[in-house]
Image (spheres, coloured by chain):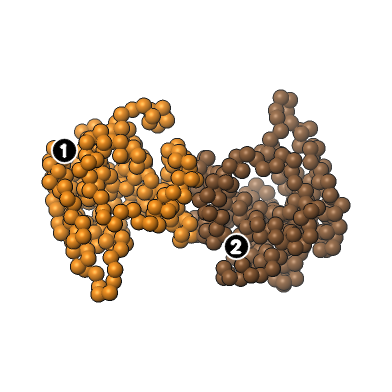
Chain colours: A brown, B orange
Amino acid sequence: MAERFLRRAAPCRIVRKLCAKAVLEHGLIEKGDRILVACSGGKDSTVLAWALATLKQELRLPYELAALHISTDFCACCKKGVLAARLAEWGIPFNDIDVPVIGRLKPGRRMNCYWCSTQRRTELLRYAIAGGFNKIALGHHLDDIIETFFMNLLGKGELRAMPLLLRYQKYPVTLIRPLGGIEERQIISCADELDILKAACTCPFGLRSKRRVIRERIASLTGGSGAEKRRILRALGSGERNLLEE
Amino acid sequence: MAERFLRRAAPCRIVRKLCAKAVLEHGLIEKGDRILVACSGGKDSTVLAWALATLKQELRLPYELAALHISTDFCACCKKGVLAARLAEWGIPFNDIDVPVIGRLKPGRRMNCYWCSTQRRTELLRYAIAGGFNKIALGHHLDDIIETFFMNLLGKGELRAMPLLLRYQKYPVTLIRPLGGIEERQIISCADELDILKAACTCPFGLRSKRRVIRERIASLTGGSGAEKRRILRALGSGERNLLEE
């Protein structure tokens, strides 16, 4: 896509276009898919729900959408009502379940991001499988993907990315990340245009410090250039082994 | 290898150990190899010649070494006599050929690093094949490898490294880079210990600006951490597709 378009177009149009590009290039959505959108109430997953609802008409791909919010015992989205109203407006059925993330901790263990995400991922999979959904859509964006790549590269010494398409071997479900080609700043602008930014919920644990450090270091590597970030994504998806599809 | 050892040991011992590690881990040298060391007269390839001559005794691998210097019409190593004397001291036969890099330019074309390296590589291959050498050893170090990886990643959008072992499909020769796991600063310290730093030749074109820029950006990404650089190297050599052996 021309860089010129990216600079000029309205934020939501950019998000829609880039989302469609990822969906088509990586075959994220197929005819007849039943997609469960994991909606935390945050800006990313809310924009994802909007984008998938909009694309449904544009792409002329018959697929079904539903959204699930997981409330935890340390962070129930304070503006769940607003989220539910938005999703209804976009024609997306919404459900909400409670997962006692802290309550499930073994004695002596402290709450951490890894534990929380594992608990929520397990419940998400369980809900999706029980409800007959064959795909789960997550709101990770380009910056998340690049951060994870560099955390694996520099921290673990592994060449591994967060894939845009992940087929589980053990479960009849596939994970998709349709916002994977979109920068966070573009998603923020779109959320602002949709007027959902103010009502967006954020985790009280905030940015994990490791991720914040790597984010700053990546900024100094790429100088914040969107073109360079997209080249990194292209690199991850090219070559003999495609790190974006597993 | 323990980080502690790397901090304490004498520079040349570190270089010898890390060179042996790369040779053994990646199978760079086999019994009976006839290895041609490309000696520019610079610090890297001179240290490489020294390391391979030293390892020959240590590894108990019977292999043969010879060195080739290519003089060009814009940069004939000013201290070739010193280089020849060093190599003789280490028991490495030495030869020197002339390649008119600028003289071969088509009219109107300007001299550049890519042209020069292509011309020299061609002559190196020709000389090696004619002389019955089955391996060519190049002096690229860890920082060179990481810089090339990031130039490919950020500039070209490709996930590609400079391999430690490159088997040519078209020629009966294999390229090896035994210093690939060693940081430049470690090579400089070793060159200093060997007292070859002062007589080392450097290309008058100096550091290409693109490489200089990426070098600074990588420094701000890794904070200059040697451990992180080695983790990047490990990542490049791991996974289903080993980017360090082709």
Horizontally, residue B219 falls left or right of residue B104, namely right
Q: Position of residue B190 (x, y in %)?
A: 28, 36
Disc 1 element = loop
Q: Look at 39% across and 52% down and name the residue there.
A: B212
Name the mark nearer the viewer: 1 or 2.
1
* Residue found at the far bottom of this picture: B107
**Figure check: A58 above or below A95:** below
**Figure check: B55 above or below A16:** above
Question: Please, what is the three-letter code of the amino acid marked with disc 2?
Answer: His
Horizontally, residue A158 falls left or right of residue A120, namely left
Quadrant of residue B172 within the rendered picture: bottom left
Question: Please, what is the three-letter code of the amino acid marked with disc 1?
Answer: Trp
| Number of other residues with Cα within 10 Å of mark 2, as a class: few under 14, some 14 to 19, many 20 or more | some
What residue is pinned by disc 1?
B90
Would residue A33 be seen by someone viewing this image from the given angle? no
Q: Position of residue B103 (x, y in %)?
A: 19, 68
**Label 1 to label 2, Cα distance in Å?**
56 Å
**Figure check: A19 above or below B32:** below
Label 1 chain ID:
B
Quadrant of residue A197 within the rendered picture: bottom right
What residue is pinned by disc 2?
A26
Q: Look at 21% across and 68% down and name the residue there.
A: B104
Q: Quadrant of the N terminus of chain A?
A: bottom right
Q: Nearer the viewer, residue B217 or A183?
A: B217
| Number of other residues with Cα within 10 Å of mark 1, as a class: few under 14, some 14 to 19, many 20 or more | some
